[in-house]
Amino acid sequence: MKLYNSLTRTREEFRTHEPGKCRMYTCGPTVYHYAHIGNLRSYIMEDVLEKYLRYTGLDVTRCMNITDVGHLTSDADTGEDKMLKGARREHKTVMEIAKFYTDAFFADCRKLNIKIPEIVVPATSYIDKFIHMIEVLLEKDYAYLSGGNVYFDTSKLENYYVFGNQEAEDLAVGVREGVEADEAKRNKTDFVLWFTKSKFEDQELKWDSPWGVGYPGWHIECSAISLWNLGEYLDLHCGGIDNAFPHHTNEIAQSEAYLGHPWCPQWFHVLHLNTSAGKMSKSSGEFLTVSLLEEKGYDPLVYRLFCLGSHYRKSLVFSWEGMDSTKTAYQKLVGRIAALSPEDGPIDEEAFAALRARFAEAMDNDLNTALAVTALYDVLKAKTDDATKRALIADFDRVLSLGLLEAAEKVRIAQKAVADAAKAASDAAGEAGLVVTCLTEGVDPAAAAEVEALIRERADAKKAKDFAAADAIRDRLAAMGVTLKDAKGAVSWEMK
């Protein structure tokens, strides 16, 4: 598998420190508010990556932090702690806020079929480990005390800007948004490892430390949580592109200073989800959530498919028109799968291997999920039996996680319920039974039931020679995008 490495800025063959095993770390959410769907794009793509690594046979151990302290409104150690900001907004304690929004994040993950990592660690549970790591950095002279706080000294490094594309001027006061002067720093790129009351006196969560009562900086938590759970050699670190600098840059600096050797060779960054107004952000106070998508009638898995249709290293522009198109595509895809015979049977091994190879080729090419979805359509068009097609769909969906077979089964159940209800109504009316057939694949079951009820109502009007009523119903159906084809004792229909 070839994967783009943000650290070397090249596509590389993915290898792990220990053959057959992969230690993977994900930067988790700061749980002061709901995750917006831009945040969740990163978690969807990281989920696909983890599942594909498992699909290829790797034994993956994945760890994720939960930031419940220390993340300031500016990533450059200035502003207010986001957790305190959330607590003030809702008149709750910081830990009440953390519990509520951690639960909300995991609920969103379940709706999007995102697997929860085996190891999830809240930052507040690792304070002693942060303190130990900071003590070692001080002993090694990579850190210093100033103004009551502990800072990491970036001047000790040969190369601080490991991800490139940043210049020293990026942190100049008044140039990078939200950055203020910190007179206690020796160098403007230095970052805080431990805050004390000398800088923030109103912090709700505080702990004793060798340097005074205070709390950890944001960057130290991911390094310590990763090291304590995944060991000294990490194989893969993931996050949104906005984490690359300064957060991941600082993680590498402090981790390698602590360890004395290279730490993580492979970095996976997902680009932003944008709206027409620019990057999606919580700072404006208005952002899109999974719950809002549901309120507007979108299954969360439609959003997952929307994300899979673009490459993770390209910015993705969100629009309701795009979601409508994806919703239609998802419904048609599920409809085509529902039309397959649900019966099990022998697998065409030759066809299975050839079609599976197309899927693997797409995913091996830097996680090209758009081509992987195309490989899914290739299965439906393939000249092989339905049992093989269903087996391939199940196989691919181990990675894509679109819930395809489950959704198709629900469509079959709904279609049967509509057919049974129509037959019962016809029998009750003493009719021979009007045969109604839908010629359009993937129509929503509720919409199909409404259309077929109107078709039968029209048939009753024609039987009663109320042609004006029958024509009015036909016009109503036409306005819904429905075209009728009448035959003796039957009506077929299509929907645009």
Image (cartoon, rainbow, N blue to C red):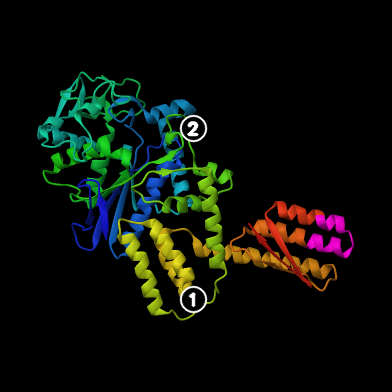
Quadrant in which residue 221 is drawn = top left
Q: How many C-alpha atoms fall within 10 Å of the one at disc 2: few (<14), some, or many (≥20)?
A: few
| Cα–Cα span, label 2 and label 1 | 47 Å
Q: Is residue 233 visible?
A: yes
Q: Is residue 35 left or right of residue 189?
A: right
Which residue is found at the position 37% from the left and 65% from the top? Answer: 359
Q: Callout 2: helix, strand or loop?
A: loop
Depicted 286 relative to depicted 492: above or below: above
Q: Quadrant of the C terminus?
A: bottom right
Q: Quadrant of the N terminus?
A: bottom left
Q: Callout 1: helix, strand or loop?
A: helix
In percent of width and height, residue 22 lies at 25, 57
Depicted 43 relative to depicted 180: above or below: below
Which residue is found at the position 21% from the left and 24% from the top? Answer: 149
- Are the residues flagged by discs 2 and 1 in contact, CB closer than 8 Å? no
Q: Amino acid at mark 2?
A: Glu
Q: How many C-alpha atoms fall within 10 Å of the one at disc 1: few (<14), some, or many (≥20)?
A: some
> What secondary structure predominates along the stretch shown in magenta?
helix
Q: Magenta residues? A: 456-471
In magenta stretch: residue 454: no
Q: Which mark is residue 324?
A: none
Q: Is residue 213 left or right of residue 295?
A: left
Which residue is found at the position 10% from the left and 36% from the top? Answer: 158
In depth, the one of 302 and 257 nearer the eye is: 302
For label 2, the residue is 286
For label 1, the residue is 387
In percent of width and height, residue 321 lies at 53, 45
Which of the two labelled residues, at mark 2 and mark 1, occupies the earlier sequence position? 2
Depicted 126 relative to depicted 153: above or below: below
